[in-house]
Image (cartoon, rainbow, N blue to C red):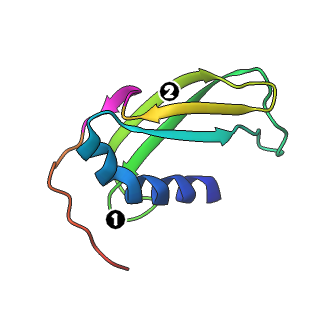
Amino acid sequence: MKTSIFFVLILSTLSGLAQNSGSGFSFQAIARDASGAIRKNEPIVIQFSLLKGSATGEAQWVETHSVNTDLNGIFSVIIGKGERQTSIQDTSFTQTTG
């Protein structure tokens, strides 16, 4: 759950940058399993979502990336260049506080 909230916050903050650049933005992380062990040299699928209103809100945009981790479990993707699962429903986002 903490990871999901972190991803939502990152994507919410950077979504404007990705829309304006037209080419996406880089994201790098270390892949771990549920027990915290690093997933070394493994194929993984990463999903990024923009959610409306809260961490449990309706998905407005979803994208997946199929990548391989390295010896240290590190993977890199360009958000905006993955396989689009949904499209943005309303291109005029309104920023809210709270």
In the image, is residue 14 above or below residue 67? below
Where's the N terminus, which quadrant? Answer: bottom right
Q: What residue is at 41 percent from the left and 64 percent from the top? A: 54
Q: Position of residue 57 (x, y in %)?
A: 38, 58
Q: Secondary structure at mark 1?
A: loop
The location of residue 90, given as percent across then percent down, is 16, 49
The numbered disc on residue 85 is none
Residue at 65% over, 41% down: 29
Q: Residue at x 56, y 53 (%)?
A: 4
Pick the front one: 23 or 82: 23
- Dividing the picture into quarters, in which one does residue 25 lie? top left
The residue closer to the viewer here, 10 or 58, is 10
Quarter location, residue 96: bottom left
Q: Residue 85's spot in the image, x, y percent?
A: 35, 30
Task: Give, as a three-letter code, the residue at label 1.
Answer: Gly
Task: Give the extent of the magenta segment.
Answer: 81-87
Residue, far bottom = 98
Q: In this view, which residue lies farthest toward the front? A: 21
Residue 55 seen in render = yes
* Residue picked out by circle 1: 53
CA neighbours of label 1 inside 10 A, class few (<14), some (14 to 19), many (20+): few
Q: Which residue is mark 2?
A: 65
Badge 2 marks a residue whose secondary structure is strand
Q: Residue 6, relative to residue 69: is it above or below?
A: below
Location of the C terminus by quadrant is bottom left
Tell me the distance, in whole angstroms, between the alpha carbons under discs 2 and 1.
Answer: 24 Å
Q: Is residue 86 magenta?
A: yes
Amino acid at circle 2:
His
Residue 59 visible in the displayed image:
no
Q: Compare residues 28 and 65 and report the one nearer the observer.
A: 28
